Structure formats: structure tokens, C-alpha cells
């Protein structure tokens, strides 16, 4: 099995330190567990999916799987290109609706996550 380096363009802001999870993610297995923390333990995947689909945020992982770094951003505002492939991204794909940005901001405030003005961030993932 080989290694690959992928390019990612994400709309959001970096969270956590270098090679460190964000503080608010400590104690959780992953981002899904964090956003579904209010879902009863005996709930099934359908209940978790409803909560996840309603969340305006997504956690994008970059750098490498061994040393992950994180971007918190608007759900769906990500463009990826695998090594050796070209992905066209035009002006329409770089437009993020103000309502989605406001929803992310409100979600951050409700979860006590320090708000930073989101922007397009170009990063890579090696894995």
C-alpha cells in the first residue's frame, strides 16, 4: 500500500494546536461523538444521523493521519483533489451563503467554541 498526498480547500478556521485536538473535542472519540453528545446512549444510527445532518459545522482533518490538525468549517464547504488529479473550482463553488456562516457562528457560540472569521484555507493531507 502506498502513500498519497491530497489537496484540500476548506472554508473555516483552524482549531487546536499543532498535532493537538481542540480542547472542546477532548473526551470524545471523534467529531460525530461531540455533536451527538446529547443523543441518548441507546439511540440508533438514525437518531445520530438526524443530529449530524442538522449540524452546520464540519471538522476537516489535514496534515497527516499520524499528526492530524483541524479546521472547523461550514459543512459542505470543502473541495478535495487526490494526488494526480485536477479538480476545477470556479467562482460559484467559492461562494458561501451568509446564512451558513451565521449558522456556524451561532453553533460555535452555543458550544463555547472561540469564533474566528472563516476564510478559504488551502491545506494538504498525507496518508
Image (cartoon, grey):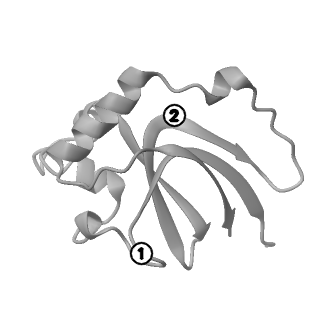
Q: Is residue 73 visible?
A: yes
Place of residue 55 in the rendered image (x, y in percent of width and height, measured from the top left): 31, 35
Q: CA distance from mark 2 to mark 1?
A: 23 Å
> From what the image shows, is residue 66 above or below residue 94?
below
Total numbered circles: 2
Quadrant position of residue 57:
top left
Which residue sits at x=41%, y=23%? 98
Q: Is residue 85 left or right of residue 73?
A: right
Q: Is residue 48 visible?
A: no
Residue to which mark 2 is pinned: 76
Q: Quadrant of the C terminus?
A: bottom right
Residue to which mark 1 is pinned: 17
Place of residue 71 in the rendered image (x, y in percent of width and height, measured from the top left): 47, 56
> From what the image shows, is residue 98 above or below residue 24?
above
Quadrant position of residue 4:
bottom right
Which residue sits at x=78%, y=52%? 82
Quadrant position of residue 63:
bottom right
Place of residue 54 in the rendered image (x, y in percent of width and height, measured from the top left): 30, 29
Which residue sits at x=45%, y=44%? 118
- Residue furthest out toward the right: 84
In this view, the residue in front, 87 or 100, is 100
Q: From the viewer's perspective, is the residue at label 2 or at label 1 nearer?
A: 1
Which residue sits at x=22%, y=71%? 27
Amino acid at each position: 500500500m502506498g502513500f498519497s498526498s491530497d489537496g484540500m480547500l476548506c472554508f473555516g478556521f483552524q482549531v487546536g494546536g499543532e498535532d493537538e485536538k481542540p480542547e472542546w473535542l477532548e473526551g470524545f472519540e471523534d467529531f460525530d461523538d461531540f455533536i451527538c453528545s446529547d443523543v441518548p446512549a441507546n439511540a440508533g444510527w438514525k437518531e445520530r444521523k438526524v443530529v449530524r445532518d442538522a449540524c452546520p459545522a464540519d471538522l476537516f482533518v489535514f496534515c497527516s493521519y499520524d499528526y492530524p490538525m483541524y479546521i472547523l468549517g461550514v459543512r459542505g464547504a470543502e473541495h478535495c483533489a487526490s494526488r494526480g488529479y485536477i479538480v476545477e473550482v470556479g467562482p460559484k463553488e467559492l461562494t458561501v451563503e451568509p446564512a451558513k456562516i451565521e449558522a456556524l457562528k451561532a453553533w460555535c457560540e452555543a458550544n463555547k467554541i472561540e469564533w474566528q472569521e472563516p476564510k478559504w484555507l488551502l491545506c494538504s493531507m498525507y496518508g
